[in-house]
């Protein structure tokens, strides 16, 4: 089954990637800040969109690992440099968006341990082609979108 998904994901069109990354979800399905409401509902929230925060996020909040049902996490266009090991708890995560985080130099290999992670979006990182290829090779079962 995994081999089939990898083949399908690598041949996926933009619409398929958007679906995996919850881009077609209704606006009411999205939580856009870690406020009291979000923290009281960590077991039910499936989409967390923290892109382009003001001020920019430099460290991923530890509370994110409490969102046990999280499927889509958008941390794009912040100043994140490290993905914490607490991400291992996000077992339902299917899509991780890290685009535009120019301080991010590598992805931790423990992301391979997330059983449902299908897509990591790394657009606008200005990584060399060699680094992109090496990253894709380190994550053979995850579609990396540069």
Image (spheres, rainbow, N blue to C red):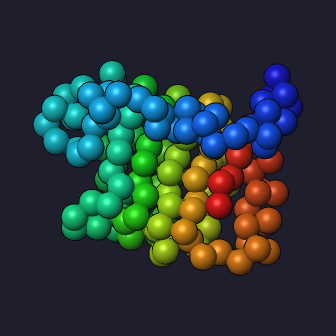
Q: Which residue is located at x 79 percent, y 40 percent? A: 11
Res 83 seen here? no
Where, quadrant-wise, is the C terminus in this rendering? bottom right
Q: Which residue is located at x 35 percent, y 45 percent? A: 49
Give the number of callouts: 0
- Judge by depth and name the residue closer to the eye, 100 or 58: 100
Q: Is residue 99 above or below residue 71?
A: below
Where, quadrant-wise, is the N terminus in this rendering? top right
Q: Is residue 13 left or right of residue 48?
A: right
User: Where's residue 120, x and y in %?
Assistant: 60, 49
User: Where's residue 80, x and y in %?
Assistant: 42, 66
Q: Is residue 52 above or below residue 5?
A: below
User: Where's residue 94, x and y in %?
Assistant: 57, 35
- The quadrant where residue 51 appears: bottom left
Q: Which residue is located at x 19 percent, y 28 percent? A: 40
- The quadrant where residue 109 appears: bottom right
- Judge by depth and name the residue closer to the eye, 22 or 65: 22
- Judge by depth and name the residue closer to the eye, 146 or 107: 146
Q: Is residue 103 left or right of residue 119?
A: left
Res 59 seen here? yes
Q: Is residue 36 left or right of residue 67?
A: left
Q: Which residue is located at x 73 percent, y 67 percent? A: 132
């Amino acid at each position: 089954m995994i081999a089939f998904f990898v083949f399908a994901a690598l041949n996926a069109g933009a619409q398929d990637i958007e679906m995996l990354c919850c881009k077609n979800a209704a606006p009411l399905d999205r939580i856009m800040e870690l406020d009291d409401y979000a923290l009281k509902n960590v077991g039910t929230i499936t989409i967390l969109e923290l892109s382009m925060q003001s001020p920019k996020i430099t460290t991923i909040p530890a509370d994110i690992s409490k969102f046990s049902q999280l499927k889509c996490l958008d941390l794009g266009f912040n100043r994140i440099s490290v993905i914490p090991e607490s991400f291992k708890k996000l077992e339902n995560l299917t899509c991780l968006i890290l685009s535009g985080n120019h301080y991010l130099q590598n992805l931790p290999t423990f992301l391979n341990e997330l059983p449902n992670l299908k897509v990591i979006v790394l657009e606008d990182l200005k990584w060399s082609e060699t680094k992109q290829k090496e990253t894709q090779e380190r994550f053979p079962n995850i579609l990396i979108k540069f």
